Amino acid sequence: MSEKKIAIVTGASSGIGLELTNTLLARGYQVVANSRRISSAGTLIASDHLALVDGDIAEQEIAQKVVRTAVARFGRIDLLVNNAGIFIPKPFTDYTVQDFNSLIRTNLLGFLFVTQYAVGQMQKQHAGHIVNITTTLVDQPVAGVPASLPLITKGGLNAATKALTMEYAGEGIRVNAVAPGNIETPMHLNDDHDFLRNMHPIARMGQSSEVVDAIMYLDAATFVTGEVIHVDGGAHAGKW
């Protein structure tokens, strides 16, 4: 078995997931990276240290394949980062059944299955770490950014982070979350960046590397579990 740490990253073909995958590889991790079409995205190239698994992580069989690939290729799972997610902001009364199903599917089923399988492996190891990517808006909603339905899902992940901490701390498994503000990623490519940067007391957009810094801190901080770290320029702290 390799002495390198083994990580799984979902939503890895762009944005925060891509930055994280490259950082993990640069720091000596072996990685299984997943997104719907990661093999053809052209942003990551499979290697001895990187396995690519195509498919929708909300599908139970894809989640199982991701975890099985990590164990078969690299022998264990030390870190799972549940990064795949979608965000649909709109007035509450405009949400549709399709919006609901899309958000539940990606943000919750995309967390549920892969985490279940990863926890099963981590229990065998008596060690492991899970990081969930949520959003600062859970703690500090902003007037002018109606997003109640996605916040049901992301707020649920914050709650699950704490619940899983209590459930599995005795088995050596840590669970944390990172709650970003507005990060310069393809998700915000066509949005009003002036508006987005002014949603933070530190009046700029964040960088993917800054979210990755928080994830790497959490992975190294072995006495930290049940934590939600806000990488949001202070937006969670209150109204300004």
Image (cartoon, grey):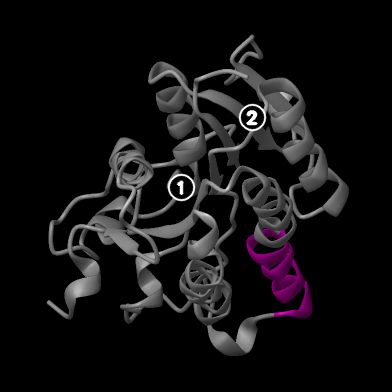
Q: Are circles 1 and 2 on residues that touch, CB within 8 Å?
A: no
Task: List the residue tagged with mark 2.
Answer: 32
Q: Quadrant of residue 23?
A: top left
Between 121 and 19, the one nearer to me in the picture: 121
Q: CA distance from mark 1 to mark 2?
A: 30 Å
Q: Quadrant of residue 98?
A: bottom right
Height in image: 190 above or below 15? below
Range covered by the magenta-colored residues: 96-109
Looking at the image, residue 72 lies above or below residue 237:
above
Front one among 222 and 181: 222
Q: Position of residue 226 (x, y in %)?
A: 40, 66
Q: Which residue is mark 1?
A: 190
Quadrant of image for the C terminus: bottom left
Q: Quadrant of residue 149?
A: bottom right
Q: Nearer the viewer, mark 1 or mark 2?
A: 2
Front one among 42 and 217: 217
Q: Residue at x 72, y 21 (%)?
A: 73
Q: What residue is drawn where x is 66% and y is 23%?
A: 74
